[in-house]
Image: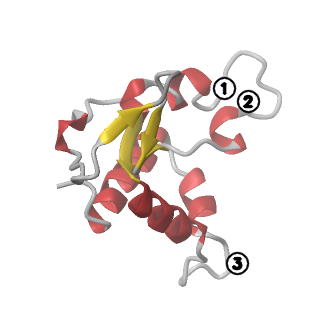
Amino acid sequence: MGAFPIFRFFRLSDEGVRCDENGLFVGGYDDHHLVQQNDRNIAKPPRDVHSEKFGWNVINAPSDRVWIPRVKHRLITNWYNSKYPNDPLGRRRRELVSEMDYDAQYQDALTTLQMFGVLQ
């Protein structure tokens, strides 16, 4: 896994970020994983008892998580859940991305955040 951009490049809107009494962020932002949380990214390959594809420690690392405006998060989630128009099997974008390696998934996430105006 190579070097990745620092999250200072993520724009936040004027809504502000607040914490509740438990220190959890509330308001207009959601916690977004750049590389998806899904079984394919977490589970061990068949017959491999020594490794995981990426594992929870990588998927939940600070370098894989950002706070983005809730509206943008919903739009991005809907986009990943939509069917990829050129896939002959009619799979969703989310399914196609999960077949990529970590670096490719990370780069896809950055491109998607740029496309939706979250990343400058």
Q: Earlier in the sequence, mark 1 or mark 3?
A: 1
- Image quadrant holding the N terminus, namely top left
Q: From this viewpoint, is residue 34 visible?
A: no
Rounded to the nearest angstrom, the CA distance separating label 1 from label 3 is: 27 Å
> Quick check: 85 above or below 1?
below
The residue carrying pointer 2 sits among few (fewer than 14), some (14 to 19) or many (20 or more) residues within 10 Å by Cα, namely some
Q: Earlier in the sequence, mark 3 or mark 2?
A: 2
Work out which residue is located at the far right of the displayed protein and give it: 47
Which color scheme did the rendering employ for the protein? Answer: secondary structure
Q: Residue at x 18, y 36 (%)?
A: 8
Q: Residue at x 42, y 36 (%)?
A: 65
* Mark 3, residue position: 89
Residues at circles 3 and 2 in contact by the CB criterion of under 8 Å: no
Q: Amino acid at mark 2?
A: Lys
Q: Amino acid at mark 3?
A: Leu
> Quick check: 3 above or below 39?
above
Q: Position of residue 25 (x, y in %)?
A: 44, 34
* Mark 2, residue position: 44
The residue carrying pointer 1 sits among few (fewer than 14), some (14 to 19) or many (20 or more) residues within 10 Å by Cα, namely some
Q: Residue at x 70, y 78 (%)?
A: 89
Residues at circles 1 and 2 in contact by the CB criterion of under 8 Å: yes
Residues at circles 1 and 3 in contact by the CB criterion of under 8 Å: no
Quarter occupied by residue 67: top left
Q: Position of residue 35 (x, y in %)?
A: 49, 43
- Image quadrant holding the C terminus, namely bottom left
Label 1: which secondary element: loop
* Mark 1, residue position: 52
Label 3: which secondary element: loop
Q: Nearer the viewer, residue 47 or 23?
A: 23
Q: Residue at x 55, y 21 (%)?
A: 57
Q: Nearer the viewer, residue 48 or 116?
A: 116
Q: Position of residue 33 (x, y in %)?
A: 48, 42
